[in-house]
Image: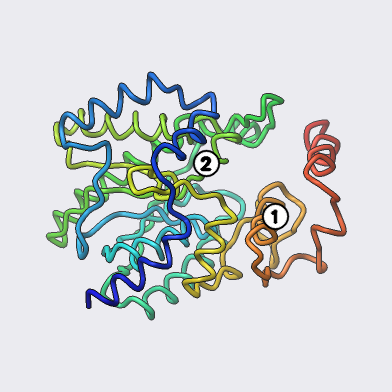
Amino acid sequence: MMQEKNSKQKKLLPFLKDKSTIERELFKNRLNEKKLLSSIESALSQKKGSPFVIPKRGQPVIALMSGGIDTTVVIGMLIEFFGLRVYPLIIDRQLPHSRKIKAVCKDLSDYFKNKYPTHFHQPFTISQKMPHQKFSLLYRFENTILFDQQREGIPLQPALYAYLAVQYGKYLRATQNVYPQTIFGGWLPENSEWYRYESLSSLRSTMLQIATMEHDFSWQFTSLAIEKELGLYLSKAQLVAIGHTLGIPLEKTWTCYKGKRHQCGTCPPCWTRQQAFKLAGVVDETIYKEGFNLKNKFNDGREFLRDVKRNFIKK
């Protein structure tokens, strides 16, 4: 058993970084203000010895599940590398493509359940419109690109997810006598270049708020992909590489804004998806609408952004 554990963790070694390297990359992002992050992490460390402590093997955790590459690979990593029992939480925001996401999550859940029958549990779905239907005007601005490289997004979105996950944890304790208190998301370092609230500083502040409000510092909220206490600071391309190594059917994940039969290949998420496969050196088996190919459409990222500005911003 120990040899099997060591063999699995060796697959992760090429992706690990030392803390000083991570911090150099981390603080290049102006949203991760060093003094602020250090203050938050100091408060967490005083209570439990470290800003984040990975639960012991066999312990239950909650993992947000969206059907996308990032959360899908995170779930695989939690089980394969850390031996954790995963209770997935799907938050259905009732978007135009929600029906497609539900179908994708079902396919992925079937895959995980067959592969990890004791460690992957039946996903729990919460329908929660974000933004609230009375603020539906905000949905129009969710992906408005600001030219400081930020999109407006949904105000406080990761925190809203975290609060629902805390309630789910308490529900599991009441109904199944299981009490997961660590919540994982799939946010990446580059995410905060798009959404300001997906920085490590933001996630740490949410964790501190939950622990303070619950008066229980066993509660943890993080993104596995940027958990520097574990030596992780992973790009989307690196997640694709890990997912490929683990044999996860990445072509079954869904990234596209549209809920059509195939992913369009032309929206910003589809573009970043294709770039990630290319950088990872992994064949992208995703079927895109009309055989769309990124290489034929855009020569580089600058051309892509010009196209976005031309076709989305001006409308």
Which amino acid is tagged 2? Answer: Pro
User: Which quarter of the figure is the N terminus placed in?
Assistant: bottom left
Q: Is residue 176 left or right of residue 159?
A: left
- Neighbour class for label 1 at 10 Å: few (<14), some, many (≥20)? some
Residue nearest the viewer, comparing 95 with 149: 149
| Tag 1: amino acid | Gln
Work out whether 161 lies above or below 120: above
Q: Position of residue 73 (x, y in %)?
A: 47, 61
Work out whether residue 69 or residue 95 is closer to the camera in this orientation and state it.
69
Residue 216 image label: none
Crowd band around label 2 with a 10 angstrom C-alpha radius: few (<14), some (14–19), many (20+):
some
Instruction: Find the residue positioned furthest to the top.
Output: 35
| Mark 2 vs mark 1, CA separation in Å | 15 Å
* Residue 155 falls left or right of residue 182: right
Residue 284, compared with residue 151, is above or below; it is below
Q: Are marks 2 and 1 in contact (CB under 8 Å)?
A: no
| Residue on which disc 1 sits | 275
Q: Which residue is mark 2?
A: 189
Q: Quadrant of residue 37?
A: top left
* On screen, residue 164 above or below 171: above
- On the image, the x and y values in percent for residue 308 come to 79, 40
Where disc 2 sits, the SS reads helix
Which residue lies at the image location 26% right of the left edge and 33% below the top edge? 210
Residue 120 pos. (x, y %): 32, 69
Examine the rendered structure and indicate whether residue 44 appears above or below residue 59.
above
Residue 256, position as x, y percentages in the image: 65, 55
Residue shown at 20% from the left, 65% from the top: 58
For the point 67% across and 24% down, the residue is: 148
Q: Residue at x 74, y 59 (%)?
A: 264
Q: How is the image coloured?
A: rainbow
Which of the two labelled residues, at mark 2 and mark 1, occupies the earlier sequence position? 2
Question: The C terminus is located in which quarter?
Answer: top right
